[in-house]
Image (tube, coloured by chain):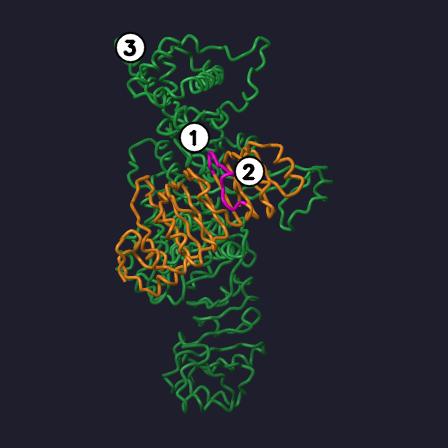
Chain colours: A orange, B green
């Protein structure tokens, strides 16, 4: 079947092992479990991918988006996937008024995103926040769901509200600064906390 | 003719040769009685369909052996059968016979290979040697002359030399043995002169791209070829199409470098390689080759940082789905595939991508692997703490160094080598900051980045941070449209204020503090005014505040006792501690940047006049 958005079609064609231009069947689209889409080319220009037709891939479990403006439409799309388990958003700008809340999402990664209202994001059990200059932890909705929390290369505001996270097992703050060191010290007594000076991922 | 078609002939089975029109037989000198020799001699001479007569020689007295080989002669003692059909094997090392001087084909076993010299002497008419074993350095000795004397009689000699060992390749070059090529994986020594005359009969062949055209497609018959290249710049989709058109059956592409890890040296199927190559072309699109190496490098580095994210779940999986993902993608996140096709990978993938992308713009880089000291603890604490079983550590005295494996690159720019770590810089560059782990010496990465146990070309040339900032032209941080402090702009300010660059470093922090205080005061006092004023009015207001007070931006940030005056001074660079509204701050800094540019232009004009 042909998709209206040729850029999305090319990405999905790659995904099912076809070259751009080769037709993708409905069955092949349904079989897709992972999509990784960047709305920018390597030169940094927006390429204008529309995500509307992603609904043709209802089996998506793992989604990674880069350089998208997350508006209400995209939030609806993300909230609409029944099996969506892992979401990674990188360099995305949030302008949505609707809440990103899909109960099937278990892991959410926010990488260098521009987020105005953290209260429009519902935290899953695993949350990774990387390169967020002003991460308002106290605004984050559903933070009591968090079991594993990675806040790396970021600055955190409202850190004291981490006391709400009753289920928290692991905290990684590599390369991050928090605005409440007392709470952090208290936390270190209770759970495993990593806080290296720099965020230097390995392996 | 397969091995299964061969029929072993005993005394009672000689009639089968004629009756069943056998094409391939095996004769063993000890299992055919002397009385059957005349019958066998007749059968061999009257059955032209016989294509292969395999003779297994077992030790016997000379007289009996002479009589046995008499089956290939006529009544007058002349050879009565095509010698090309006879393949001799068995205890060749210990036996001897006049017939051996005529034998053209022999099959040797592992235990014969070490005595290759003697065997060669014994069979002066030799044309073909069949040897299915693998030859290692121990078999024929370190002098490769023996290996090549054997390979004269074989299409392909299977080798078991270390892949990175260049001794065979060097021997070919030094001795001008142009009739030979060593397959790219170092596992087959190919006798080109032989296979040019007849089609090669190997199911798979791994060959360097530069050697591919030495063998014609028809000579390769149905051989599936894996082409080995040094980096992706060497083989485009168009070139692959061309080879396909010529008749080569290229199935896989392997990008091999001796520094690479297993995941990277693993061959890609053709489709994946083409996709990877297309993405690499997109990555370097628009980067002109006439600009300097450093400029080209900076652009590629920046693009990788801004397009590919670190794939945390692949290394630190937390849920069942992530654990499965981590297992499935373990290899692909460490080579070119995931980084280029999915936009996410781990350090090994980043380093592989950078190496290949730089090759596309004519810059040499190497993949480097090593360890990073993650933590240093006492031996006592190490025993107390429950580390995972696979933790990488080293005990030195009473200290334990917890290590993490890591990969990065060494890059050659203007004939000098530098360490660069695109993985660690990715978040910084994506956030608009200058890279920190870029263009470093070996000493710097050992001391500052705690990297150890790495090899590669020596990196000794220091590059100052200003030069890197200029190369990348990325601001230290970005607020709104304003980038502060872009080194180009900073230099502009200094030219305007007539300050020395060396003094600037020591005074900039004080100026920052002063500036911060001012900004806080302005926002505190004039917040309502700022929000209501039009830009024009605001400009006037701003100018009134700042136009003539350059002199005031001085050393007032220090207290009388010389200590720092602000408790937050340590974090004064960190804007999150300024307690200033970001939008308003952005407006303010926009204006400062405009003033800086105006200053620079004015200063330029003054310079021109001078």
Mark 3 belongs to chain: B
- For the record, the magenta segment spans A131-143
User: Dot 1, how many residues are within 10 Å of its Cα: few (below 14), some (14-19), or many (20+)?
Assistant: many
Q: Secondary structure at mark 2?
A: loop
Q: Is residue A133 magenta?
A: yes
Image quadrant for the N terminus of chain B?
bottom left
Residue B296 in percent (x, y) is at 35, 35
Q: Quadrant of the C terminus of chain B?
A: top left
Q: Which residue is mark 1?
A: B434
- Lower position in the chain sequence, tag 3 or tag 1: 1
**Tag 3's secondary structure?**
helix
B17 versus B173 height, above or below: below
Checking the image for residue B606, the label placed there is 3
Residue A88 got which mark? none
Q: How many marks?
A: 3
Question: Disc 2 to disc 1, how far (Cα)?
Answer: 19 Å
Residue at 43% across, 17% down: B525
> How far across and down, in percent of the image, does residue A109 sit?
47, 46
Residue closest to the eye, B55 or B346 = B346
Magenta stretch: includes residue B385: no
The residue at the point 43 percent across, 70 percent down is: B104
Nearest to the eye among marks 2 and 1: give it. Answer: 2
Q: Is residue B67 above or below residue B12?
A: above
Vertical comparison of B5 with B183: above or below: below
Q: Which chain contains the residue that carries disc 2?
A: A
Q: Picture coordinates of residue A130 (x, y %)?
A: 48, 40
């Amino acid at each position: 079947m042909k998709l209206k958005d040729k850029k999305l079609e090319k990405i999905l064609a790659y995904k099912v092992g076809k070259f751009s231009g080769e037709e993708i069947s409905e069955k092949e689209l349904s079989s897709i479990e992972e999509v990784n889409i960047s709305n920018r080319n390597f030169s940094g220009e927006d390429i204008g991918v529309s995500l509307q037709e992603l609904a043709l891939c209802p089996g998506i479990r793992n989604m990674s988006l880069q350089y998208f403006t997350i508006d209400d439409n995209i939030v609806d799309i993300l909230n609409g996937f029944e099996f969506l388990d892992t979401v990674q958003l990188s360099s995305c700008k949030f302008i949505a008024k609707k809440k990103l809340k899909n109960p099937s999402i278990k892991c959410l990664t926010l990488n260098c995103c521009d987020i105005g209202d953290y209260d429009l994001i519902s935290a899953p059990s695993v949350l990774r926040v990387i390169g967020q200059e002003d991460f308002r932890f106290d605004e984050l909705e559903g933070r009591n769901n968090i079991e594993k929390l990675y806040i790396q290369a970021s600055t955190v505001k409202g850190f004291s509200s981490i006391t709400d996270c009753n289920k928290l097992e692991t905290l990684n703050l590599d390369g991050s600064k928090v605005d409440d060191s007392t709470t952090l010290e208290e936390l270190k007594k209770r759970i495993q906390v990593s806080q290296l000076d720099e965020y230097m991922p390995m392996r | 003719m397969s091995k299964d078609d061969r029929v072993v002939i005993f005394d009672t089975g000689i009639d089968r040769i004629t009756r069943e029109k056998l094409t391939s037989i095996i004769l063993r000198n000890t299992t055919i009685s002397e009385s059957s020799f005349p019958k066998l001699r007749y059968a061999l001479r009257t059955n032209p369909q016989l294509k292969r007569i395999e003779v297994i020689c077992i030790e016997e007295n000379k007289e009996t052996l002479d009589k046995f080989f008499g089956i290939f002669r006529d009544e007058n003692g002349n050879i009565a059968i095509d010698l090309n059909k006879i393949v001799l094997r068995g205890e060749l090392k210990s036996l001897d016979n006049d017939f051996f001087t005529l034998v053209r084909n022999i099959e040797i076993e592992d235990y014969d290979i070490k005595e290759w010299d003697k065997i060669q002497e014994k069979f002066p008419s030799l044309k073909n040697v069949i040897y299915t074993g693998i030859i290692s350095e121990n078999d024929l000795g370190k002098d490769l002359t023996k290996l090549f004397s054997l390979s004269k009689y074989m299409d392909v000699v299977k080798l078991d030399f270390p892949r990175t060992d260049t001794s065979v390749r060097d021997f070919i070059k030094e001795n001008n043995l142009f009739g030979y090529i060593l397959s790219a994986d170092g596992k087959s020594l190919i006798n080109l002169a032989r296979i040019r005359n007849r089609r090669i009969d190997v199911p798979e062949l791994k060959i360097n791209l530069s050697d591919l055209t030495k063998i014609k497609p028809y000579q390769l018959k149905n051989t599936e070829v894996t082409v080995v290249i040094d980096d992706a710049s060497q083989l485009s989709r168009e070139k692959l199409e061309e080879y396909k058109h010529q008749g080569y059956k290229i199935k896989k592409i392997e990008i091999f470098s001796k520094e690479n890890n297993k995941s990277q040296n693993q061959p890609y199927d053709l489709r994946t390689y083409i996709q990877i190559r297309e993405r690499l072309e997109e990555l370097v699109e628009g980067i002109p080759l006439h600009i300097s190496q450093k400029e080209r490098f900076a652009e590629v580095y920046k693009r990788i940082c801004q397009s590919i994210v670190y794939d945390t779940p692949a290394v630190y999986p937390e849920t069942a789905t992530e654990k499965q993902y981590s297992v499935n993608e373990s290899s692909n996140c460490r080579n070119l595939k995931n980084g280029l096709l999915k936009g996410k990978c781990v350090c090994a993938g980043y380093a592989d991508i950078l190496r290949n992308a730089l090759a596309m713009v004519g810059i040499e880089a190497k993949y480097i692997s090593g360890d990073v000291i993650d933590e240093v603890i006492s031996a006592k604490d190490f025993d107390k703490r429950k580390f995972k079983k696979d933790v990488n550590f080293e005990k030195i005295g009473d200290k334990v160094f917890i290590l993490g494996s890591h990969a990065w690159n060494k890059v050659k720019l203007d004939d000098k080598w530098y360490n660069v770590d695109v993985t660690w810089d990715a978040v910084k560059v994506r956030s608009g900051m200058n890279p920190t782990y870029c263009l470093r010496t070996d000493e710097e990465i050992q001391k500052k980045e705690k990297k150890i146990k790495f090899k590669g070309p020596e990196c000794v040339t220091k590059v100052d941070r200003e030069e890197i900032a200029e190369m990348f032209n990325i601001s230290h941080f970005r607020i709104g449209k304003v980038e502060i402090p872009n080194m180009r702009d900073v230099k502009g300010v200094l030219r305007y204020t007539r300050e020395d660059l060396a003094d600037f470093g020591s005074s900039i922090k004080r100026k920052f503090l002063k500036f911060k205080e001012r900004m806080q005061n302005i926002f505190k006092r004039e917040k309502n005014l700022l929000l209501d004023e039009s830009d024009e009015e605001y400009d006037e207001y701003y100018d009134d505040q700042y136009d003539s007070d350059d002199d005031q931006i001085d050393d007032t940030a220090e207290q009388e006792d010389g200590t720092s005056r602000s408790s937050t001074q340590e974090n004064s660079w960190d804007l999150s501690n300024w307690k200033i509204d970001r939008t308003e701050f952005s407006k303010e800094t926009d204006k400062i940047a405009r003033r800086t540019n105006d200053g620079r232009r004015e200063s330029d004009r003054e310079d021109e006049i001078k």
